[in-house]
Image (spheres, grey):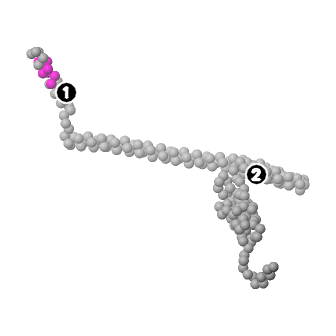
Amino acid sequence: MADTPDTATPAPEAAAGATAPDTPLTPEEQLAAANAEIAELKAQLKDLQLRNLAEMENLRKRNAQEIANARDFAAKDFAFSLLAVKDTLEMVLKDQQSTTEQIKMGVDMTLKNLVGAFERAKVKEVKAEKAKFDPNVHQAMTQIESTEEAPGTVLQVFQKGYMIADRVLRPAMVAVATAPSTKDDGAAPAAQA
């Protein structure tokens, strides 16, 4: 049994030697360590913030470029569709021997080409004749008294309106029905039967 205490004695000394580097830090040392850690975290945060700002700027530039490309491509596609219209008009103007009927056929063909170009570009005519007046797509130019149509009904279209996709490109210029006026214009009332 005497051997046991001798072998156990060196172990506490070894343990004491191992804990010597783990001595508690002074408050000044703890503060310095915390300040160093804070400075490192601030630097990391600043770096992350700069990276995020750069990424946002790159994303903004990419989006602006994509929008410009889409706009240019859409204009290019529509312009290409209009080339057939221009070609047909030029052929009609060059032809000096066409009859009125042939010129009319050429104009009709040109109109069909133009309507096709509009359809591809999603340009649609605003329905106006006999429709209920809608200030979003119609522009009232005048009012006409009517006993045949309900007030607010479009009676006449002076200029067609057009929409592109769901937006008004040009409102239809229209005349709108109003109820007949009930003003007494000095005439004697009609005899009632």
Amino acid type shown at disc 2: Val
Q: Is residue 7 magenta?
A: yes
Q: CA distance from mark 2 to mark 1?
A: 91 Å
Which residue occupies the foreground of this view, 63 or 157?
Answer: 157
Q: Nearer the viewer, residue 140 or 189?
A: 189
Q: Which tag, 2 or 1, sits closer to the chain's start?
A: 1
The range drawn in magenta is 6-12
**Chief SS of the magenta region:** helix
Residue at (67, 57) in percent of width and height: 169
Say few, some or many: other residues with alpha carbon within 10 Å of mark 1 (under 14 / 14 to 19 / 20 or more): few
Tell me if residue 181 can be seen.
yes
Vertically, is 152 above or below 184?
Answer: above
| Residue at the spot of label 2 | 115
Question: Would residue 89 appear left or right of 125 to someone viewing this image?
Answer: right
- Which corner quadrant holds the C terminus? bottom right
Q: Residue at x 41, y 45 (%)?
A: 49
Task: Quadrant for the N terminus, please.
Answer: top left
Dot 1 amino acid type: Ala
Residue lying farthest front? 193
Q: Quadrant of residue 171?
A: bottom right
Label 1: which residue?
Answer: 18
Depth check: 183 or 109 in front? 183
SS category of the residue bearing label 1: helix
